[in-house]
């Protein structure tokens, strides 16, 4: 048995470092494997003991007379290295090292880890760890609990990957409280060999895994992760991938020379990856389990196979016996991308027949506090049958006349007749527990609070939207890579790493951007001559390596329509620049043709190690860092990525003909985003770039670069 099968479903295990002392890791892990009911053979390895927990011990793995699939090592680094060599000689299929003291502490520990990794790689033996919790497989024919956790979780349909071992023990305890089952559970620690990408591929092929959950700290194989995630969440047999990512704050955003660099902290990179691959992101561990619960909700398909119930659209009906929780659910529903369904007249008339006069027949439906299970059943059956409804949220609060179990039975009866998801919220603990247990036993999602239920329903809708996303025909981009290589090389050779829009113009023109006529002036007379040559009205801009953002220094004057405006404007801009910074190095004043009106947007890019170029689109102008209304994707991007970037900002309505305005040229924006992606991929010397503002004109009229800066790197 080789590869990850040897790790998750071994027929024989050698525990190297098994201890006779209770409380030691080597003792407790060995005991956990035994108590978990492992269906294979287990061999303790301890040269100083005859037996461990009454099981015969062996001095080394080489003394075990039978084949060994998995070597489980609990030894300090120097001894672990020798154990790895012996395990490879024994021809094991996999190795798990739970011990710490390796790469995470640096020095000799890091060197030993690298040597172990090389040995395993050369021998084609898969390695988990070091510095990890271990491996759990509760599936009945395996029953492996090779971990720190005393409790074997019950079998389920969800596989969990975590880099943090300490988090895993808390998650297992949390899961036990919620009666939550797993297919596989693994802590990967230092990721000397096996990482998230390997495990995602394994779980994608695993028939016992239907949902993949990941606690993610950092990625090393970012590009491989993206490709694997796309493969899993797309295609003819997609599986949802749910992720919680540590370090969401923007504190990691570096001090950058561009708006893009300032806005794009490291979390923006991960958010872009998740959006680009269909991964569902959770904000908390509790939310992660809420989403997983919803994704294991099954219904019978026309082919007789079980499939996850997901809403075909975002229209939700809420049925509740209390107004307050209904309002909370309504608020959260709207913020998760869902909307309250508008009932048909037939639905409202039917509700009138079964609900008392004091009930609300509009959405959310309030069946009143004295509602019996029959009233719930009738109301739910009516609203879920409405063609304007894609899913339902049922809320029950315990009243003196409430029968929680009977209501749960009613929900199951209605849910079994429809492919639309019905998510329940039974608020409370003791009084509603019979109903909660009934729903859980029958595989129906139930939550304690309405906001949890609404977010879970929103996650289902988001995944379904990803599965049915529109596939757009690619846009062909013409560009001149060779000329841009020459331009960039020329600037770098002269030590010019910060390029203003005059220097950027030729680069952008090579990738299909429309720029404005412009020339540099060093006197009012030159400025006037240029303005007369390119035509009024014009814009004047200060050009200085010491002024990062021209507006901050009052270094931009627009819509100058006369010779006098230009002459006076030149003097004003120079004066403003010297007031802003007395030691400023002024290269001149740029005279630029005034652009036609358009919506101010921004296209930007910044480069991250491991991930590559991060492309940004958003609402531009001087307030870009105030509103931060932007979206991100990792290059290279497709037209579909570009379209969803544009649609993903709040200001998108400004491009669609908002309040009688003309529709703007969204196609041109998509094309320029793809051009930016190709520019960044083709020219790794570009570290950061801002095109701000990009003026997006009426449909069919394109978009114009009004300002740009590029930061090069010489390495």
Image (cartoon, grey):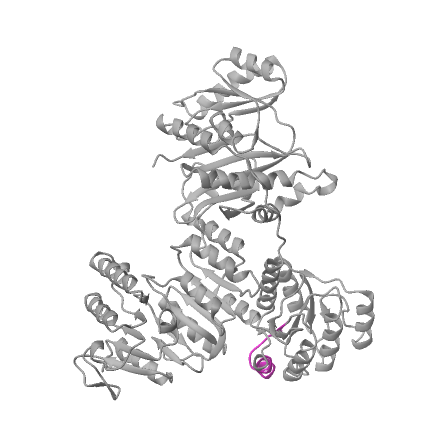
Which quadrant: the C terminus? top left
Residue 24 in view: no
User: Residue 120 or 397: which is nearer the viewer?
Assistant: 120
How many numbered circles does the render carry? 0
Left or right of 215 on screen, residue 694: right
Q: Is residue 474 left or right of residue 494?
A: right
Percent x, y of residue 554: 51, 26
Residue 169: image location, x then y, percent: 38, 72
Near-viewer residue (576 or 100): 100
Q: Is residue 288 above or below residue 254?
A: below
Furthest residue toward left = 48
590 lies above or below 176: above
Q: Position of residue 15 (x, y in %)?
A: 27, 77
Magenta highlight on residue 427: yes
Q: Tell me the magenta residue range.
A: 423-439
Which residue is located at x 51 percent, y 39 percent?
Answer: 676
Can you say which quadrant of the picture contains the N terminus? Answer: bottom left
Residue at left offset 46%, top offset 80% = 154
Q: Nearer the viewer, residue 352 or 700?
A: 700
Query: Residue 370's spot in the image, x, y percent?
Result: 71, 79
Direction top: furthest residue: 525
Vertical comparison of 605 with 185: above or below: above
């Amino acid at each position: 048995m080789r590869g990850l099968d040897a790790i998750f479903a071994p027929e024989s295990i050698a525990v190297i470092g098994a201890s006779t002392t209770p409380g030691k890791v080597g003792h407790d892990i060995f005991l956990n494997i035994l108590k978990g009911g492992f269906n294979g053979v287990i061999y303790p390895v301890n040269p100083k003991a005859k037996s461990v927990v009454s099981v015969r011990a062996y001095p080394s793995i080489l003394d075990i007379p039978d084949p060994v699939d998995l070597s489980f090592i609990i030894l300090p680094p120097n001894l672990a290295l020798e154990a790895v060599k012996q395990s490879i000689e024994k021809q094991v299929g996999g190795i798990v090292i739970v011990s710490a003291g390796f790469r995470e502490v640096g020095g000799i520990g890091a060197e030993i880890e690298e040597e172990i990794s090389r040995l395993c790689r050369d021998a084609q033996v898969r390695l988990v760890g070091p510095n990890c919790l271990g491996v759990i497989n509760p599936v009945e024919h395996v029953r492996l609990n090779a971990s720190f956790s005393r409790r074997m979780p019950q079998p389920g349909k969800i596989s969990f990957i975590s880099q943090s071992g300490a988090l895993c023990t808390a998650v297992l305890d949390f899961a036990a409280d919620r009666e939550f089952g797993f297919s596989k559970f693994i802590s990967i620690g230092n990721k000397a060999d096996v990482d998230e990408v390997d495990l995602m591929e394994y779980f994608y092929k695993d028939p016992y895994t239907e949902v993949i959950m990941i606690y993610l700290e950092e990625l090393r194989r970012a590009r491989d992760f993206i490709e694997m995630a796309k493969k899993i969440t797309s295609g003819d047999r997609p599986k949802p991938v749910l992720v919680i990512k540590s370090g969401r704050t923007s504190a990691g955003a570096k001090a950058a020379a561009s708006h893009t660099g300032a806005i794009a902290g490291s979390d923006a990179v991960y958010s872009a990856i998740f959006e680009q691959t269909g991964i569902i992101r959770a904000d908390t561990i509790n939310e992660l389990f809420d989403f997983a619960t919803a994704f294991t909700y099954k219904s019978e398909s026309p082919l007789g196979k079980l499939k996850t119930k997901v809403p075909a659209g975002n229209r939700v009906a809420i049925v509740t016996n209390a107004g307050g929780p209904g309002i909370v659910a309504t608020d959260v529903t709207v913020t998760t991308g869902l909307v309250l369904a508008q009932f048909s007249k037939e639905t409202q008339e039917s509700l009138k027949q079964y609900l008392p006069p004091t009930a609300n027949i509009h959405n959310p439906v309030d069946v009143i506090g004295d509602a019996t299970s029959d009233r719930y059943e009738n109301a739910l059956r009516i609203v879920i049958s409405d063609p304007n409804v894609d899913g339902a949220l049922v809320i029950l609060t315990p009243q003196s006349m409430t029968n929680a179990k009977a209501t749960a039975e009613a929900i199951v009866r209605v849910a079994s007749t429809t492919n639309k998801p019905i998510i329940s919220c039974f608020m409370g603990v003791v009084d509603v527990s019979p109903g909660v247990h009934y729903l859980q036993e029958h595989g129906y999602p139930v939550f304690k609070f309405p906001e949890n239920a609404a977010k879970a329903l929103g996650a289902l809708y988001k995944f379904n939207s990803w599965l049915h996303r529109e596939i757009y025909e690619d846009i062909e981009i013409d560009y001149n890579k060779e000329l841009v290589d020459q331009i960039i090389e020329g600037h770098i050779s002269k030590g010019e790493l910060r390029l203003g829009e005059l220097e950027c113009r030729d680069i952008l023109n090579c990738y299909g951007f429309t720029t404005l006529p412009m020339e540099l002036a060093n006197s009012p007379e030159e400025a006037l001559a240029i303005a007369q040559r390119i035509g009024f009205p014009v814009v004047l801009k200060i050009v200085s390596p010491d002024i990062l953002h021209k507006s901050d220094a009052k270094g931009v004057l627009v819509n100058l329509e006369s010779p006098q405006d230009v002459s006076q404007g030149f003097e004003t801009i120079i004066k403003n620049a010297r007031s802003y910074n007395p030691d400023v190095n002024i290269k001149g004043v740029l005279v630029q043709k005034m652009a036609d009106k358009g919506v101010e947007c921004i296209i930007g890019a910044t480069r991250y190690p491991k991930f590559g170029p991060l492309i940004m689109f958003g609402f531009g102008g001087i307030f870009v860092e105030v509103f931060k209304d932007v979206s991100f994707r990792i290059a290279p991007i497709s037209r579909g990525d570009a379209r969803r970037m544009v649609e993903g900002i709040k200001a998108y309505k400004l491009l669609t003909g908002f309040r009688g305005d003309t529709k703007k040229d969204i196609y041109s924006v998509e094309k320029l985003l793809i051009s930016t992606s190709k520019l960044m991929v083709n020219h790794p010397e570009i570290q950061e770039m801002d095109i701000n503002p990009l003026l997006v004109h009426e449909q069919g009229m394109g978009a114009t670069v009004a300002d740009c800066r590029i930061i090069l790197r010489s390495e």
